[in-house]
Image (cartoon, grey):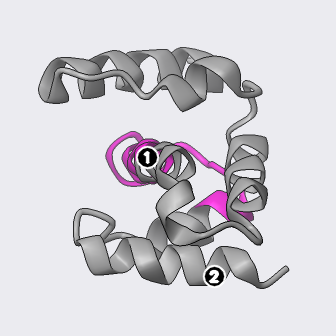
Amino acid sequence: MTCAEHLLIVDRAYAARTGARVEFLERAMPCPTELYLKAMRMMRGRPFDDCDEALKGLVFLQEVAATALWRHRCPVGDTLASFAREFDRLDVPAEHERLYVRAQTP
């Protein structure tokens, strides 16, 4: 299974579970690492309240990376593996703020 196929499957599962789609991923590049880097850049220098779209994309991307790593034993690269491990509690709102702060430092 390619990364793009995996993203599509997990995106559909996420949409079914939550009733919403993460539109961020529909407009972004297909490479997951590039998605992560783009979302982090989108938040840099912007107020926290203006970063909801990027944060939603990162929450979803963390779920995809974690699923690939631990459920399917698929390599996701060092950058995404580190992100998936360090931010494994993005279901907690305070973790969104910690991720936002991380994005502010290049």
Q: Quadrant of residue 31?
A: top right
Q: What element carries label 1?
A: helix
Graded by Cα atoms within 10 Å as few (under 14), some (14 to 19) or many (20 or more), the crowding at tag 1 reads: some
Image point 35% across, 70% down: which residue?
88
Q: In which quarter of the image is residue 20?
A: top left
Q: Does residue 2 show up? A: no
How many numbered marks, from 0 up? Answer: 2
Q: Between residue 84 and residue 49, name the one nearer to us.
A: 49
The vertical placement of 91 against 106, above or below, is above
Q: Which amino acid does label 1 sit on?
A: Lys
Q: Residue 45: give x, y in percent of width and height.
A: 76, 72
Q: Mark 1 points at which residue?
A: 56
Main SS of residues in magenta: helix
Can residue 3 be seen here? The reply is yes
Q: Which residue is at a point 52% across and 69% down the rendered structure image?
A: 48
* Residue topped by disc 2: 102
As drawn, is 36 to the left or to the right of 23? right
Q: How far apart are marks 1 and 2 (CA)?
A: 15 Å
Query: Which segment is the magenta one?
Result: 60-80
Question: What residue type is disc 2 on?
Answer: Arg
Task: Name which residue lies at 26% across and 71% down.
Answer: 93
In the image, residue 69 lies in the stretch drawn in magenta:
yes
